[in-house]
Amino acid sequence: MKKSRYLALAMAAIALASAFVPEVALAAQQFVAIIGPDNLAMLSLAGTTLAINKPRAYELGDRNHLPVIAADIIYEGAAVGLVDATGHARPLNAADRFAGFAIAKADNSLGAAAAIMVEVQKSGEIELAVTGAVITDVGQPVYATDDDTFTFLPVGGAFVGMVKRFVSAGVAVVEFNAGIMLDPYGDTVRETVSANLTTDIEDTGKTLFVDTDAITITLLTYAAATAHRVKVVNIGAFGAVAVSIDPAAGDKIAGPNDTGADGGVMVNTKATARRGDYVVLTSGGDDGYIVEEIRGTWTIA
């Protein structure tokens, strides 16, 4: 019999005795006053330990089984995605949440949704062909645009994991843990920049990923009544891409090692530029833009 049942019986006995013996009733009132009604209620819920064996279903900690979308096939080794609207698994689509890699082929080409399950490896380390991978990319986040295409560009891809080790040109070992490891770029509106760009009010709140050398981003002309905030990320390989950020002629960028000159151009120095270098700029003060966050080697001249 569970402890809570013993407590219930004891309380019932006290209540019965209290009805006939005034001294017991007084003692019971004093006990409740000392213990407190809330604590007494908690005591009544205590002691719910098992009195018999209770077998439970266990699974390997790095595996999962997911219901497959209707009329589709997930092949062994495929990156598996979860459809937000239904929770069903499918060969990963860029809009999906990454759920792991298929351990074996799951053929539901003739079945209804959830007719079969796919077994996935949801955590571990895997060798992948990652577009543009070089030896300096250890620690970089990796994204999938479909079930077998992996890239460093966070735009239009699902976050998979982080590079653990470089293997060869375009090949890396990626550490992953679906649902646990988080995308370091967070939940932002993302855009690829491959040509010179002048920002406008619609770029406020965006993260701009520059993937081409010698690109200049010209900032929206500062106005006190207009808030403007952008994050610029150099997504090129080490030493391959220079990024310039140019305020309007009458504006300035206030930040580390700022020269104080209006119209000063901020440059992520190409020779030391690393994939993932970034700066967050926000309008403020009376002069133009302020550096909120910065990583990498940037100059303002």
Image: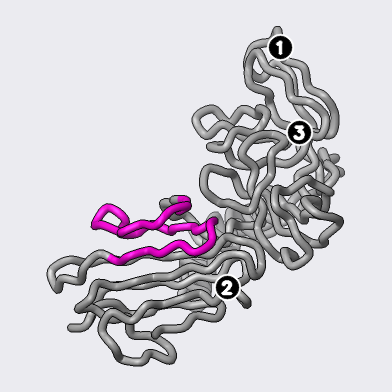
| 207 drawn magenta | yes
- Give neighbour class at mark 1: few <14, some 14-19, many 20+ (Cα, 10 Å): few
Is tag 1's residue or tag 3's residue first in the polypeptide sequence? 3
Q: Which residues are magenta?
A: 192-219
From the top left corner, tell me how far across and down residue 16 is, in percent.
Answer: 55, 55
Query: How many numbered circles does the render carry?
Result: 3
Residue 2, image x, y percentages: 74, 51
Q: Is residue 44 above or below residue 80?
A: below
Residue at mark 2: 270
Whichever of callouts 1 and 2 sits on the residue coming sooner in the sequence is 1
Kindly identify which numbered label has been placed on residue 109: 1
For the point 51% across and 61% down, the residue is: 18
Tell me the kind of residue under disc 2.
Lys
Mark 3 or mark 2, whichever is nearer to me = 2
Residue type (three-letter) at the residue carrying disc 3: Ala
Q: Is residue 212 magenta?
A: yes
Quarter occupied by residue 80 = top right
- The residue nearer to you, when weighing 114 against 135, is 135
Q: Marks 2 and 3: in contact by CB < 8 Å? A: no
Residue at which label 3 appears: 78
Does 58 appear above or below 196?
above
Q: Are marks 1 and 3 in contact (CB under 8 Å)?
A: no
